Image (cartoon, rainbow, N blue to C red):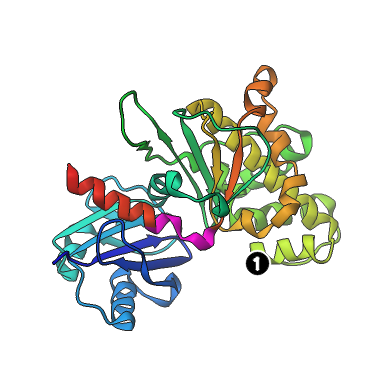
Amino acid sequence: MTPLRLLADIGGTNIRLAWQDQPDGPLHDTRVLPCAQFPTVDAAIAAYLAEVSIPTPREAAFGIANPVTGDEVRMTNHSWCFSQSALKASLGLQRLVVINDFTALALALPTLAPAQLRQVGGGAAVEGSAIALVGPGTGLGVSGLVFPPGASHGVPLSGEGGHVTLAAQTQREFDVLAILQERYGHVSAERAVCGAGLVDLYHALRRLAQRGGKEVSSAAQVTDLALQSNDALALEALDLFCGFLGSVAGNLALTLGARGGVYLGGGIVPRLGTWFDQSSFRARFESKGRFQPYLAGIPCWIIDPTATPALHGAARALDIAGTE
């Protein structure tokens, strides 16, 4: 009998869990649990297993929002930390695979159906070319797939591209980043292009304006002010956010030669709907001087997060580990 497989996508805000009864099988009992409700990842998993009432899985694969460089895993944007070997033992697993969450998402990209994607600009993807992946949520995830000659599947990238240094392109951006630098020192892309980053952008614009605006504490509040109340500062903050995302995505596309397309993951961009299409994202994505024509042909797709693709990518990681 094939052992049950536990799958998890662990972000800074939520943990998504599901299980399979066989490789390539459907996901069962998908749940989304707030990380803040549980003191440890072990506690969250135990709560899930108790709720869905399945036998103890023998295999598990987790995508998690931080670097995975050794046995100890310590999350960048949440308090959870654990030893992989200790977690494997406490759960009674025969196999445990832990990878970066965007590496897991990258593994799932070739399996996404057209209905799970919405294109924003560009032309057709070039088959066999590298694929780029970037996504703002609690943090800023970055990955991609490359296709070495003769490889049957894309090879996922595992890095921390969300923490590259963010550059300003206008005086307004320079002034905003100066405020962020005053607060954080190093201003990475993630400092502006994530949920907390959108809040910081809005507050920086309030400071520069020296009047107006409201106190906010979440990205949802900023987007509601912008898209529902037509608040000028919130609209400017949201467009700065999209412009910075475009610059980062364009840099990544150039770095990887991602003529296979750029995928936008994370939970923030899908919530912006078609407003995102007329934001500064696409113009800034292509605004690379002599390489504007090169980037103009590259398609960008927004991933529908309800498809839980990172869970499918975690399952794929388990399959790959089993063949090595």
Residue to which mark 1 is pinned: 217
Residue found at x 53% / y 59%: 305
Farthest top residue in view: 290
- Asked whether residue 148 is in view, the answer is yes
Residue 136 higher or lower than 19, as above or below:
above
Residue found at x 74% / y 67%: 215
Q: Residues within 10 Å of mark 1 (few under 14, many from 20)?
A: some
307 in the magenta segment:
yes
**Quarter residue 247 falls in:** top right
Residue found at x 68% / y 47%: 241
Which quarter of the figure is the N terminus placed in?
Answer: bottom left
In the image, residue 225 lies at what x, y percent?
Answer: 78, 64
Which quarter of the figure is the C terminus placed in?
Answer: top left
Counting labels gives: 1
Amino acid type, residue under disc 1 in the picture: Ser
Q: Nearer the viewer, residue 108 or 86?
A: 108
In the image, residue 254 lies at what x, y percent?
Answer: 55, 26
Residue 111 higher or lower than 132, as above or below:
below
Residue found at x 72% / y 61%: 223
Q: Which residues are magenta?
A: 305-311
In the image, residue 227 lies at what x, y percent?
Answer: 78, 61
In the image, residue 73 lies at what x, y percent?
Answer: 30, 55
Q: Nearer the viewer, residue 298 or 73?
A: 298
**Predominant secondary structure in magenta?**
helix
Q: Is residue 35 left or right of residue 98?
A: right
322 in the magenta segment:
no
Q: Nearer the viewer, residue 165 or 145?
A: 145
**Quarter residue 91 falls in:** bottom left
Which structural element holds mark 1? Answer: loop
